[in-house]
Image: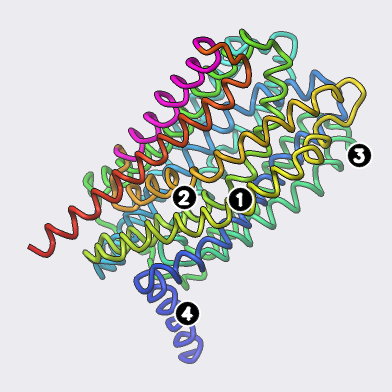
Amino acid sequence: MSSNNQNLNSEVDQRISMVTGDPKKAIRALSVPMIISMLLIMAYNLADSIWVAGLGPNALAALGFINPLFMIVIGLGNGLGAGATSLIARCIGAKNKKNADNAAIHSIILTLVISGIFTIFTLLFLQNILLLMGAGETVNLAIQYGQIVFGGLVLFIFSSVASGILRAEGDVKRPMYAMAATAILNIVLDPIFIYYLGWGVSGAAWATIISSTIACALMVYWLLLKRDTYVSFTRKDFKPSWLVIKDILVVGLPASAESFVMSVLGVVLNLILVITGGAEAVAVYTAGWRVVMMAMIPPIGIGTAAITVSGAAYGAHKYQNLSIALKYSVKLGVGIAVVTSLFSYFFAGNIASIFAYSSQSAFMAPQIAAFLQVMCLFYLTVPFGITASSIFQGMGKGVTSLLLTVLREVVFVSFFAYLFAFTLNWGSSGVWWGIVVGGGLGCVVAYIWANYYINRLKKSYVK
């Protein structure tokens, strides 16, 4: 038994040493499983859409009306997870296990409370919300799916927060395993519940709930039952504190709000596209943006790893490590982006054909290809902005991260999209260039500000 305990302690010590040690090594070690996890999430989300598509356009549209609400829930979970990661990592960096334990317990309690509030609110007002969104004749199908999914809202938020707790101490493999189990089970259960049992859209919802329960059960086992983590969850470790709650939410809420900001930008850009090119322009943008989101997975994964590393460095007052984490994350992200950009540019036509394979949509292929070739420039600047925001989140500066996102997405992108589309009369392609120029400018500004802020920390600490 003592041998097993020694092995567990050794594994935990190795993870903590990695998080608090060489930032470059930690970024590499933490980012790869995160990238894989995000790819699995994409597969998870696509599974429902692919199988539900076979039920007809109304069923797929019903899913489309639920998705924005579902993404708000996912954004909330990811935000609270980032808040937990940031605070626990800072405590680990400061070598304060007692506060790390207390922060982890507060994160779980906060998750249960917020999940309960959002579940009640969503179920009570789901029909009204869907009607306001224009669900119309698909509202009953959307309610069938939504009531089941949002009834299990706690599963999604808890899994995200639990993953954030594990990431804070350098354990990113187990969240990846949980996501793999969830994605695979969801893909297997979808056709069985939807078609074999004849449950339709309700079957897709139950497949999502059951597969998510598996991930949640694994997290509960690892954190609360197996107890082989750095943080511990016992009554003596818990000391109620509004300050701890504030520290979690000061990162968690702004991080969650960033998902909302992206939704606002989507509405603005779709409006410009409808005016300049109609439904066809929106369709081109929608199809092309799916590819863009895939290309953004590596920098987002690297940025998520940077939250842990920067949190530990900030807690330990190792501000030089903050600078290394910022610059190395950007360097790694840009290196991957160069490869992605070249591949996207030269194979844009082949990629576009995937989204325009039918006779009804074949005419869009050249426009989708042109969109992808313009976006190649966007990929090169994305790592600067995502990394800067992640570093600020790691330091507990969630509001700064949110402000940088608003500046980048709402102010710069919206302004340049309007300028190019209407003032310069570039039409729909003006929106594409607005994303490239506005997003690129916003990302560079965010990086400059993060670098300036860290340099100030280093100078003040020396004094």
Q: Secondary structure at mark 1?
A: helix
Q: Amino acid at mark 2?
A: Val
In space, the residues marked 4 and 1 are separated at their CA atoms by 25 Å
Residue 232: give x, y in percent of width and height.
38, 66
Q: Amino acid at mark 4?
A: Glu
Q: Nearer the viewer, residue 279 or 220?
A: 279
Q: Amino acid at mark 1?
A: Met
Q: Is residue 411 above or below residue 463?
A: above
Residue 433: give x, y in percent of width and height.
55, 27
Q: Earlier in the sequence, mark 1 or mark 3?
A: 1
Q: Is residue 276 above or below residue 3?
A: above
Q: In the rendered structure, which segment of residues is drawn in magenta?
A: 400-423
In space, the residues marked 4 and 3 are separated at their CA atoms by 45 Å
Residue 415 lies in the magenta-colored region? yes
Q: Nearer the viewer, residue 189 or 276?
A: 276
In space, the residues marked 2 and 3 are separated at their CA atoms by 34 Å
Q: Secondary structure at mark 4?
A: helix
Q: Is residue 173 above or below residue 268?
A: below
In space, the residues marked 1 and 2 are separated at their CA atoms by 15 Å
Residue 425 lies in the magenta-colored region? no
Q: Earlier in the sequence, mark 2 or mark 4?
A: 4
Q: Secondary structure at mark 2?
A: helix
Quarter location, residue 377 = top right
Residue at x 46% of width, y 91% of height: 2
Q: Amino acid at mark 3?
A: Tyr
Residue at x 50% of width, y 23% of height: 265
Quarter location, residue 59 = top right
Q: Which residue is mark 2?
A: 161
